[in-house]
Amino acid sequence: MIKINLIEYFENTVDSFPDKLAVVDGHSQLTFEELKQKAQLISNQISKRSNSINRPVAIYLPKSNDAIGSFIGTLYSGNIYTPLDTKNPVPRIEAILKALKPSCIITNDKFISNINKCNLDIDIINLDKLDQEENIGDCSNFRKCIDTDPAYILHTSGSTGVPKGVVISHLSIIDYINWVADTFDITENERIGNQTPFIFDMSTLDIYLMIFKGATLYLIPEQKFIFPATLLDYINENKINFLFWVPSVYVNIANLRLLDSIKIPLVKKVLYGGEVMPPKHLNYWIDNLEKNVIYGNMYGPTEITGTCVYHIVTDKVNEHESLPIGKPCRNTDILVLNEKDELCKVGEKGELCVRGSSLALGYWNNLEKTNKVFVQNPLNNSVPERIYRTGDIVYLDENGEYKYIGRKDFQIKLQGYRIDLGEIEHHILSVFDTINAGVFFDKAKNEIVLLYESKNEISVKEFRIKLAKVLSKHMIPTKYVKMEVLPKSTTGKIDRALLNKNINT
């Protein structure tokens, strides 16, 4: 039978693997049947407060089994789950809640005081106060949901200071996860090591491969990523064989050369996304893992449900060329448009735009911002057809794969030259083995600045000699700032806003 919403997939998995381990966090573990019971208990509490469907439910919990249970419980109730970051300051949480207007908020004893500080009239479900013996009533509201209904809302930064809530449908997730499962041959034997927070769209792949295929999901404790040697030990102890991490994590492990001494022989699939993967660091992983490992670049913004373009690597890559982001995923079409909204030719740079069922429904309660980036396809004058303008600059190479250049807002003009700062970062990482780097433009001083993470100071002379071999003179940074640790966002990516502050302080 064709499944039209996410709970139908979950119930099929529970029926197939009731006693199999579903999810493991740093404190507990749940089988699929236990996860279902937890979710339905939460669903009951949501429905007691409102029996309507397609309303937001805020989840204010750390990354945990409770959070996963709350997501699925919200879907059982026919509603839209919205993860909130417990590390965010209260004013940001309050701003999100005001825009979201959720029917209720799910939290626990540890975080309930923060919710009370928001001074908002929202029903609270405290998981620490739930009666675990309560009879589970009717949890069939999900049957009212069709595939175009919203499933979750993830918040991204907004230019006005108010986060934008990206609304993703059941259909988009179903389309995406079925493609991933087919492309990477995902089965119930996958043991997934989750790195990304639940407020980050990369986690969608981890969570729903568990739900759709009966894979086991390990929520790796955050502390393991601070001490990477313990991270590799954790992978071996739990026999994890599937990774989908941001490149910064892979780069850190490569820079420390940890795989020289700690092998992870059971890992068979290594995916990455969210940032550009430096070829040199990818080659380190290829050199140190088993020969049959699949490496996959997964490109895509939150607004297209995770991935719209992908590239699979099976052998070492040229360290002096940027990696392609690849070809469109199944049921996704890519348009590269120039400034006149014309289709770019092979080799011509333009803005990457996406069409297909992967597109988000828009931004919650914000039609103005929705209509700025989800626009009518300028190449289709016959019927209404939305495309999403990503703001990313790419070009199609002669092999039929897309190459990423950078952001429209990450380009500068210096000495009459148009320069992409991402290209400079790529070349820096290609010639220096042991650093991580972020490049920015100081408008006040009209200079390119390199901030780098390294144990040892690198002289300006060494930087300039090595970079002169791979960069034009006008692209070489003129200021170099060493940092013990580059600031990271909650998703694990380099936090460019904080780097900008470092430049100006």
Image: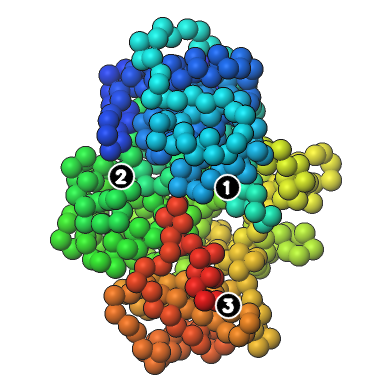
Query: Which label belongs to residue 92?
Result: 1
Residue position marked by numbered label 3 in the rendering: 441
Of all residues, the one furthest to the left in this rendering is 261
Vertically, is 409 above or below 249? below
* Residue type at tag 1: Arg
Q: Are marks 1 and 3 in contact (CB under 8 Å)?
A: no
Q: Which is more foreground, mark 1 or mark 3? A: 1
Q: Quadrant of residue 150?
A: top right
Q: CA distance from mark 1 to mark 3?
A: 28 Å
Q: Position of residue 134 (x, y in %)?
A: 40, 9
Q: Residue at x 79, y 63 (%)?
A: 340
On screen, residue 55 versus residue 251, left or right, reads: right
402 with respect to 385 (left or right): left
- How far apart marks 3 and 2 lie (CA) works out to 35 Å
Q: Residues within 10 Å of mark 3 (few under 14, many from 20)?
A: many
The mark lying in front, picked from 1 and 2, is 1
Q: Name which of mark 3 and mark 2 comes first in the sequence.
A: 2
Which residue, given by chain and number where applicable, does mark 2 sit on? 221
Residue at position x 42%, y 55% from top?
Answer: 492
Q: Relative to 191, is 380 above or below?
A: below
Please report whichever mark, 1 or 2, sits nearer to the chain's N-terminal start. Answer: 1
